[in-house]
Amino acid sequence: MLSMIGLIGGLALLIFLTMKGMNLLVAGPLCALFVAVCSGLPLFPQLAGEGEANLVGNYMSGFTSFVTSWYLMFLLGAIFGKVMEDSGAADSVSKWIVDKLGMKFAVFAIVLACAVLTYGGVSLFVVAFSVYPMAISLFKQANLPRRFIPATLAFGSVTFTMTSAGSPEIQNWIPIDYLNTSPYAGWEVSAIVALFMMIFGYWWLKRMISKAVAKGETFVSRENDPVVADKALPNPFTGLLPLVVVLILSYIFHDSLAQSALIIALLGGVITTYLLNRKYFKSFWNAVSDGTMGALIAIGNTAAVVGFGGVAKAVPAFQTAVEAMTSIPGSPLIGGAIAVSVIAGMTGSASGGQAIALPLIAPHYVEMGVNTEALHRVVAISSGALDSLPHNGYVVTTVRSICGESHQDAYWAVGALTVIVPAIGVAIAIILFSLGLGI
């Protein structure tokens, strides 16, 4: 009982401290300590038996494993975003979009850029780094409140694209190993749900921004924002081409190199930006240096939350919660959706929710004769709902490290679009599959 109180309390404390603005590098270990003490978990490896769980070992294992897997992607993604900003390429593209579509389509342009890159296989973190310079420029020109930039980036990246049929993102691929399906499983229902999330979510985003503008909110510049008023800009085509290069290279190498394809793709994007726009740089190497520092902060914040998840998974209450979630009676689709979504929320990870739940629920549900394509799609979509609570690594990185906003100002719009909208999408998917569509 105390272990469960510790697990729930630790998660609630992490969310509370995140919303209050505490540094994640402090909040993560602090909340992990709370969970460990309540569960009687040894604090140090020397106090635990060989191979047994302990606070320091499990926290640092989660922390370092994330850094090991993602450091180069974070580094090159941050550098790519900075060179796009410093060269004026992002401003050139944004100005062209505004000239062609009009200022009222500024938000749509950002959502579209994120969606194309995400569905093209570019990492969610990298998409945020890459599109942010264009987003800040568009919001500035349209005089929109910048606190909605994180929600705009997140909506285009982690809702109607990340978990849709055909998406190369890992959240769409994990179920394949457990259900023997394909990335296009349940594509008919997926298309309907994606269309709903896209239309409803965009309407909601625009409504929130319009209400804020009506109350007098405007874009507020900061000292570290790029100054472009008197600066010559590159051709919009040479500004857009680096993004196209990233998309093409990630698609070409995705099957053979998996996530490592992003290293080649982003390096290609950086080189392309330099070669095409080198005469427009204020300082290429300063941009590289700034990107490097930004990457370190971003990956540190995210790894701090992943470390908390490493401790949470080691306590007895977590296994009890998993067993309860994966044995929910009734429709397997409802049970699977709840199990994956809740576990994703506890770990702050969509892929983590799937990786923990599927080994437990997949054999049981397959034996029951559930349609595996329907289960695949429901599990994928549901993993992208509660995972986006305030402590989620992507949310923390995008809100704080990339956009420089506080959770109090920016998260409510992010939560509305990345928690509520996908949750409604899951319900629609379950209803459609239950009616026999796509089965």
Image: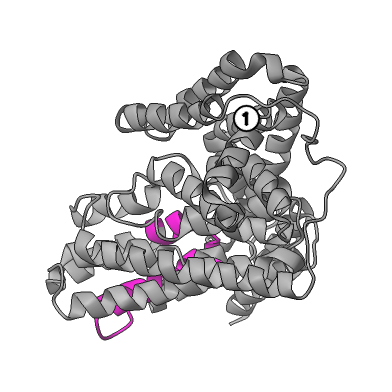
Q: Nearer the viewer, residue 422 or 94?
A: 94
Q: Identify the residue at the far bottom of this view.
A: 330
Residue 55, can we see it?
A: no
- In the visual, does 117 lie left or right of 280? left
65 is higher (above) or lower (below) than 1: above
- In the visual, does 405 lie left or right of 115? right
Q: Position of residue 405 (x, y in %)?
A: 75, 56
The segment highlighted magenta reads 327-355
The majority secondary structure of the magenta stretch comes to helix
133 is higher (above) or lower (below) than 15: above
Q: Nearer the viewer, residue 94 or 334?
A: 94
- Quadrant in which residue 239 is drawn: top right
- In the visual, does 57 lie left or right of 249? right
Q: Position of residue 349 (x, y in %)?
A: 51, 58
- Magenta stretch: includes residue 202: no
- Magenta stretch: includes residue 343: yes
At 48% from the left edge and 64% from the top edge, which residue is drawn? Answer: 344
386 is higher (above) or lower (below) than 111: below
At 37% from the left edge and 72% from the top edge, which residue is drawn? Answer: 425
Quadrant location, the C terminus? bottom left
Residue 182, can we see it?
A: yes
- Amino acid under label 1? Ala
Q: Which residue is mark 1?
A: 89
